[in-house]
Image (cartoon, grey):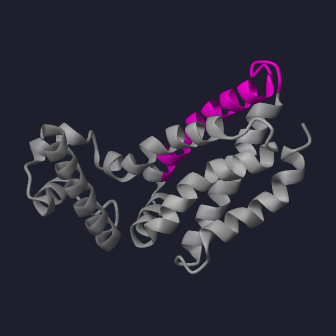
Amino acid sequence: MAERKRQLVSNELTEAALQLLASKGFDAVTIDEIATAAGVSKRTFFRYFASKEDVVVQFLAGMGADMRTELAARSPQERPSAALRHTVGVPIATCADHSDRALRVVRLILRTPALHARFLERQAQWRDDLAAELAHRLGLDPGTDLYPRLAAGMALTAFDAVLHRWSGSDGAEDPDELIDRAFAVIAPALDAV
């Protein structure tokens, strides 16, 4: 019951923050405003989040783990391009499934330097995690073989390009179709192992 209540408060804070940040802009919103909009104290806010940046990038926390889990679950016989396409398809599907909210968050992240920096930090960790998983899948040494890191980097660059294009189109373009097009470009290099 306590965990359920904790999740409800976290969700309420996140939703209040996203609505305020989307309407007023990141720099114009204070933590006090977020807490008030969520109906909690500032102290309660800090029990859940260290900063307002953390509220926005919270949804990113599990993406890296989800992608690594997806890659690990793919058949070892599958071409690297197909495995990586399905891997980055996990967060792309989340964006498509929660289009309005995801679009607000993606726009906020890409247009706010502090948030974009945090997003890039996360992507660097995802790249390392995916590179380690790729190396394991392919029996390569991630310390000496360039392929795992390059392949993970290409997949995440495709992911990043799709997010930019999707948010730039105001959600009009289908992110799943965009990721297919991006992987059509990079697949030959990914499969040249």
Residue 134: where, in percent of width, then height? 72, 32
Q: Is residue 34 above or below residue 42?
A: below
Residue 179: where, in percent of width, then height? 69, 62
Q: How many marks?
A: 0
Name the residue located 82 percent from the left edge and 29 percent from the top edge.
146
Identify the image quadrant of residue 68.
top right
Instruction: From the viewer's perspective, tell me whether residue 164 is left or right of residue 21.
Output: right
Identify the image quadrant of residue 2.
top left
User: For the stretch drawn in magenta, what is the main secondary structure?
Assistant: helix
Instruction: From the viewer's perspective, tell me whether residue 136 is left or right of residue 4.
Output: right
Q: Is residue 175 above or below residue 75?
A: below
Q: Is residue 141 above or below residue 166?
A: above
Residue 145: where, in percent of width, then height? 83, 24
Name the residue located 72 percent from the left edge and 45 percent from the top edge.
83
Whether residue 135 is in magenta: the answer is yes
Residue, far bottom: 172
Instruction: From the viewer's perspective, tell me whether residue 137 is left or right of residue 28.
Output: right
Closest to the observer, 83 or 95: 83
Identify the image quadrant of residue 137.
top right
Name the residue located 44 percent from the left edge and 42 percent from the top edge.
62
Q: Is residue 116 above or below residue 67?
A: below
Instruction: From the viewer's perspective, tell me whether residue 98 is left or right of residue 121.
Output: left
Q: Which residues are magenta?
A: 116-145
On-image quarter of the N terminus: top left
Whether residue 160 is in magenta: the answer is no
Name the residue located 34 percent from the left edge and 45 percent from the top edge.
54
Closest to the observer, 43 or 143: 143
